[in-house]
Image (spheres, rainbow, N blue to C red):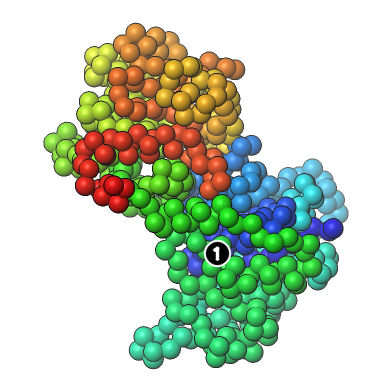
Amino acid sequence: MATKYIIVTGGVTSSLGKGIICASLGRLLVARGLRVTIQKLDPYINVDPGTMNPYEHGEVYVTDDGAETDLDLGHYERFLDIKTSQENNVTTGRIYYDVIMKERRGAFLGKTVQVIPHITDEIKSHVIKLGSSQDYDVVLVEVGGTVGDIESLPYIEAMRQLKYEVGRKNTLSIHLTLVPYLAAAGELKTKPTQHSVKTLSESGLSPDILVCRSEHSLDGTIRRKIAQFCNVDIEDVIASLDAESIYEVPLLMQKEGLDLRVIDKLGLPAKNADLKRWIEFVDKIKFPKKEIDIALVGKYVEHHDAYKSIVEALIHGGAVNDCKVNVRWVQSEDLTKQNVEKELGGLSGILVAPGFGDRGIEGKFVAVNYARENKIPFFGICLGMQCAVIEFARNVIGEEDANSTEFNENSSFPIINLMLDQLDVEDKGGTMRLGKYECEIKDGTFAKEAYQSNLIEERHRHRFEVNNELREQLVENGMVLSGLNPERDLVEIIEIKDHPWFVGVQFHPELRSTVYDPHPLFTSFVKASVEHGKAQHKEVFKAES
Ligand code: GLN
């Protein structure tokens, strides 16, 4: 069967949840036995989001092959239980970069290089390349931005051409739009949707299916009106109402018949949907037996998208433990020895987040110190792990000046320093230690207990590491270096023994956690936190007794 392409565009406004709709439809198609992947086309001129501030763009999601990508790829992996790669995220920056490189090599000799056909051809070739890379039945193509944006135009045109070239039987256009409720009029309004569809249709890409985000249900009259004015069948008007959890969206879309419409229109050979495990998972998060509060200590806490995958991994790990994890967002800049008891006292677990730069760093040391001394389950991720090592060097080894050379180049005890291969790196984009590397795990450690394996692979995004010249002093003072990279002898996991659960990891386990494959470290951390919470304040466990 030829690969089918489903083009998903968005209209009226941003933040309608296009990524979640794509991931949800993807999940429904996978549940019917189809091979599916999702590609995100981002209209910005950065080559990748790697150099963007988390306030701008949220988390940078790193794939196995070391691509720094849009956080929607995280949703794709978590929902579909697939691995994505560089090819799943295309930006305008990358497209232009590739076209300009080709021009310099003389690939277009004699021609004027133009948006049409050269840029649009390059966009199409990326889409087709992904589709043919692995025998996919379906590629969902999420076009970033909002229809009508100047910067989205080449993508819309490329998708129009794609539809023409691979054939109508093999493509489908889904448009996600907003049907707002005007309280003053007491009515749902269809005009924004009509305008958005009109704009899209003027570009030659009329939608086959409309997914309408709304805060109120769409009755028959509204659906008929939308269908009539937007030129789609009434069955192709799909309502997408607000859900309590993003994980409910696939089930809501199934109820609305989105997958059936897609299967029907594309003639896909689909089995009955097997969503048993998904439904069990949603039940667990909707009706948890217990609840705990975990601190997430970081400097971007006002912007939760900066820690997207961590929050999702806590939900996955929570579900395994029949537990709802409430995240207490703690701004590390405001955390001091004086207020730490007030901020972190009574919580079941403390997680110190990844990050770059020294803003709020001292507050992170305070959080680590509090978790270590009060024996509260602690999880340090990347910078969080580096903070745990620095805190240990300062307060256990007694090296008061211990630091990372990222924050103090003149530290007399640079227990975290720049990796050797980073010394001469000047460019900021795509030059960190990125992607999947191996880690060997020692027996008798928290890590071994969690993973149940001595060799694992995890994704990375960092420039600094534990200083191998000083690391023996950590061990002599009781820190366990429980995971090492065999190739370069880099410290990947640290632990403290005389503690209920104290683990720091140089890598990003949150990027690998999915609904069907929750990450073992998050599962273990939540389990230890539940036990700690039980011992501390039994009242939150009423539901269990
Ligand atoms: N800034 C630290 C480094 O580059 C940690 C990075 C991170 O937390 N992702 O090593």
Element class at badge 1: helix
Q: Nearer the viewer, residue 435 or 240?
A: 240
Find residue 471 and report its horizontal and vertical position in percent. Answer: 40, 13
**Quadrant of the image for the N terminus?**
bottom right
Horizontal side, residue 210 vs residue 165: left or right = left
Residue 342 is situated, as x and y percent measured from the top left of the image, at 16, 42
The image quarter containing residue 262 is bottom right
Name the foreground residue: 528 vs 51. Answer: 528
Q: Farthest residue toward the front?
A: 545
Residue at image coords 34%, 21%: 496
Residue at figure coordinates x 40%, y 85% from the top left: 182
Residue at x 71% of width, y 47% of height: 98
Question: Residue at position x 54%, y 76% from top?
Answer: 239
- Give the tally of numbered discs: 1
Is there any visible trace of residue 54 in the rendered image? no
Residue 311 spot, x, y in % from top left:
42, 47
At label 1, counting other C-alpha atoms closer than 10 Å, the crowd grade (few under 14, some 14-19, many 20 or more) is some
Mark 1 residue type: Leu
Q: Give the vertical position of 366 relative to 15 (above or below).
A: above
Most extreme residue toward the left is 338
Judge: label 1 CB < 8 Å from ligand 1: no
The answer, for residue 389, to whether it is visible in the render is yes
Judge left or right: residue 535 versus residue 77. Answer: left
**Residue 78, position as x, y percentages in the image:** 55, 49
Residue in front for this viewpoint, 447 or 311: 447
Q: Mark 1 highlights which residue?
A: 251
Examine the rendered structure and indicate whether residue 43 appears above or below residue 480: below
Residue 100 is left or right of residue 49, and the answer is right
